[in-house]
């Protein structure tokens, strides 16, 4: 696939490699955290600071995202002793991570602060269940919701399924092809001690699990968990003083939408997702193309979302997504592994940030698998991807994260190894 | 007066500030489907909006639109979220291309109107009916009456129409 023309970049090319992710941190991925979202967020931010080798006073910006289900930056900053020069808590779920990284870059470019920590904290199982049961389904149906919830059209799976079904109709994509995403991610998770689901499953296991709403089987859907995640972004210059190798940000695209985002199904083809538009920003901004990418982090709220995004960002021809995700390419040991942590299907659900964290660790060549730690404190990776083994990708120079809010909205980011 | 009603165990709430939705569901309550037509570019639009998505004009009039079309995509829910829907599983959520304005303003566009598959009297369809419906099935609009001033548009099989020999359905059955 040819590289896109530099001239089409929508951000100045001098922003490439000018900012970096220098710290990543998370809580455990559990069901039953035993603490508040404030407690979880504090825990993840402290871990990110420690990972970066930064003191609280080295960070002066904070961003978070939520859907009325979490705490705010002011409380986390207070708990960890950060005096803020900038903060903002935005509404939103998936596709927020990459978009907020872009905002963090812009805020620092404007001279408003010097290092930004971004967090997502949620009791997605024990408080506000992300699948839509409990608190979320008790709210009266009003306004725009009269055109969806009144029809029993509410959960993410229910809302996205017309896209998934139409892709099968238009291109002959099969349930077994898409189930291969779950099988691949479960293999990856089996080599991730942090993952909530570490058991490997097969395509047959997915197809034998019960139907939630067609075309989604239970195992086509991600896990609901309690957790928080955090990342720290700063300038590439400042990043040199941090503890770990820099993950340099090549380019971002944030919350790129299809037309009629109030009701995106009005505009077809509905089997195409927002990645079709986001790729026109992502690749030129990054100065690379799909062929240059070694590892992808394609949002897997559902097996189908991974497939649709890889296809529409151009990792394969339009319509070939089913083949792409089932021919071995996305597996560890394959040409371009996807979601090597196990992603939302298996590691845990944090609205996109854990896939960014994983790619930072891949670029550092230091994923936290079960490989032995050497005298230099780094893991000695074996590249043996058997169950319980290694999950480090041998050659990992360039990664792409493809965030998903829904078929009509997506964000993306390309990073490279220092 | 604000409308507060119960439908399938859910509270539906339509307040007086919801000018566009009040008009939309009010027409539905008279079993007479209407959509907004732009006063400037004359395109119809769905669902109700406060300006024209095609030309930005705030001027619009409500015009009657024939409630007929074909299923563009669907999902069939086996695991319901809302408790009252559980008794009706599997239920179908249809995305229907209206015949009116299909393929406009661009080739793949349509007025895609959401609704459940329902019986002619507006009740959620039984599973025998669900099995007959897929992409391409010809449907006509019916209504579920919720309260005065509020009915939900729904879809039922158009028995009078020429149907595809085998509408496309999810393959693993």
Image (cartoon, rainbow, N blue to C red):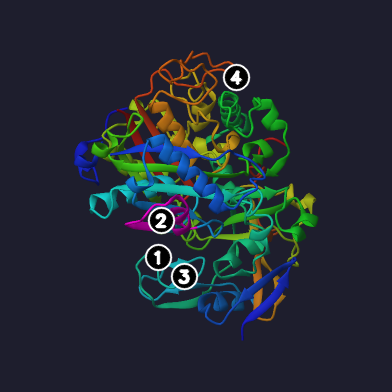
**What residue is pinned by disc 4?**
A388
Tell me what residue is drawn at x 63 percent, y 74 percent: B13
For residue A185, above or below residue A229: above
Q: Residue at x 40, y 55 (%)?
A: B106
Left or right: residue B128 compared with residue A118: right
Q: Which residue is mark 3?
A: B49
Which quadrant does the N terminus of chain A fall into? top left
Compute the Cα span from label 2 to label 4: 44 Å
| Disc 1: host chain | B
Looking at the picture, how far across and down is residue A126, in whole percent?
A: 66, 50
Towards the viewer: A278 or A168: A278
Rounded to the nearest whole Å, what is the CA distance between mark 2 and mark 3?
14 Å
Magenta range is A72-87
Q: Are marks 2 and 3 on the same chain?
A: no
Q: Secondary structure at mark 2?
A: loop
Which residue sits at x=55%, y=31%?
A342
Name the element at disc 4: loop
Residue B163 vertical placement versus B16 (above, below): above
């Amino acid at each position: 696939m040819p590289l896109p023309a530099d001239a089409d970049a929508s951000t100045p090319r001098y922003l490439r490699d000018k900012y970096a992710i220098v710290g990543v941190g998370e809580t455990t991925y559990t069901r039953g955290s035993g603490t508040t979202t404030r407690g979880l967020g504090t825990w993840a931010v402290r871990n990110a600071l420690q990972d970066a080798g930064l003191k609280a006073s080295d960070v002066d910006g904070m961003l978070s995202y939520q859907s009325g289900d979490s705490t705010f930056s002011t409380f986390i900053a207070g708990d960890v002793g950060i005096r803020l020069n900038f903060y903002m808590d935005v509404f939103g779920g998936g596709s927020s991570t990459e978009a907020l990284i872009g905002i963090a870059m812009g805020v620092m470019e404007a001279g408003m602060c010097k290092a930004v920590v971004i967090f997502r904290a949620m009791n997605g199982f024990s408080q506000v269940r992300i699948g839509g049961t409990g608190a979320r389904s008790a709210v009266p149906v009003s306004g725009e919701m009269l055109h969806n919830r009144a029809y029993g059209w509410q959960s993410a799976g229910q809302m996205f399924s017309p896209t998934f079904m139409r892709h099968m109709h238009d291109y002959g994509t099969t349930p077994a092809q898409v189930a291969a995403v779950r099988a691949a991610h479960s293999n990856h998770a089996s080599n991730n001690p942090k993952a909530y689901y570490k058991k490997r499953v097969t395509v047959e296991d997915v197809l034998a699990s019960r139907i939630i709403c067609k075309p989604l089987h239970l195992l086509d859907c991600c896990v609901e968990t309690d957790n928080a995640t955090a990342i720290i972004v700063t300038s590439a210059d400042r990043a040199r003083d941090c503890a770990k190798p820099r993950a340099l940000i090549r380019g971002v695209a944030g919350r790129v939408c299809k037309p009629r985002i109030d009701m995106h199904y009005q505009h077809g083809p509905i089997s195409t997702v927002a990645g079709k538009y986001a790729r026109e920003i992502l690749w030129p901004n990054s100065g690379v193309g799909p062929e240059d990418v070694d590892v992808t982090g394609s949002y897997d709220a559902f097996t189908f979302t991974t497939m649709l995004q890889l296809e529409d960002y151009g990792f394969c021809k339009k319509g070939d997504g089913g083949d792409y995700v089932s021919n071995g390419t996305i597996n560890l040991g394959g040409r371009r592994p996807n979601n090597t942590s196990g992603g939302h299907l298996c590691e845990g659900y944090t609205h996109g940030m854990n896939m960014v964290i994983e790619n930072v660790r891949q670029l550092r060549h230091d994923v936290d698998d079960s490989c032995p730690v050497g005298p230099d404190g780094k893991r000695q990776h074996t590249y043996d991807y058997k169950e319980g083994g290694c999950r480090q990708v041998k050659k990992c120079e360039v990664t792409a994260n493809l965030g998903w809010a829904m078929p009509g909205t997506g964000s993306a980011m390309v990073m490279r190894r220092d | 007066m604000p409308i507060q009603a119960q439908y399938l165990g859910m509270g539906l709430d339509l307040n007086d500030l919801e000018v566009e939705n009040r008009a939309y569901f009010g027409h539905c309550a008279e079993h007479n489907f209407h959509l907004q037509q732009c006063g400037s570019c004359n395109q119809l639009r769905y669902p109700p909006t406060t300006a024209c998505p095609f030309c930005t004009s705030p001027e619009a009039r409500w015009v009657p639109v024939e409630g007929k079309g074909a299923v563009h995509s669907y999902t069939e829910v086996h695991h319901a979220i809302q408790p009252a829907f559980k008794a009706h599983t599997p239920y179908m959520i249809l995305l229907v291309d209206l015949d009116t304005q299909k393929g406009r303003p661009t080739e793949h566009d349509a007025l895609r109107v959401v609704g459940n598959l329902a019986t002619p009297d507006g009740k959620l369809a039984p599973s025998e009916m669900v099995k007959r419906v897929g992409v391409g099935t010809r449907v006509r609009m019916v209504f579920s009456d919720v309260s005065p001033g509020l009915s939900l548009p729904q879809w039922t099989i158009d028995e009078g129409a020429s149907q595809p020999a085998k509408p496309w359905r999810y393959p693993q059955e």
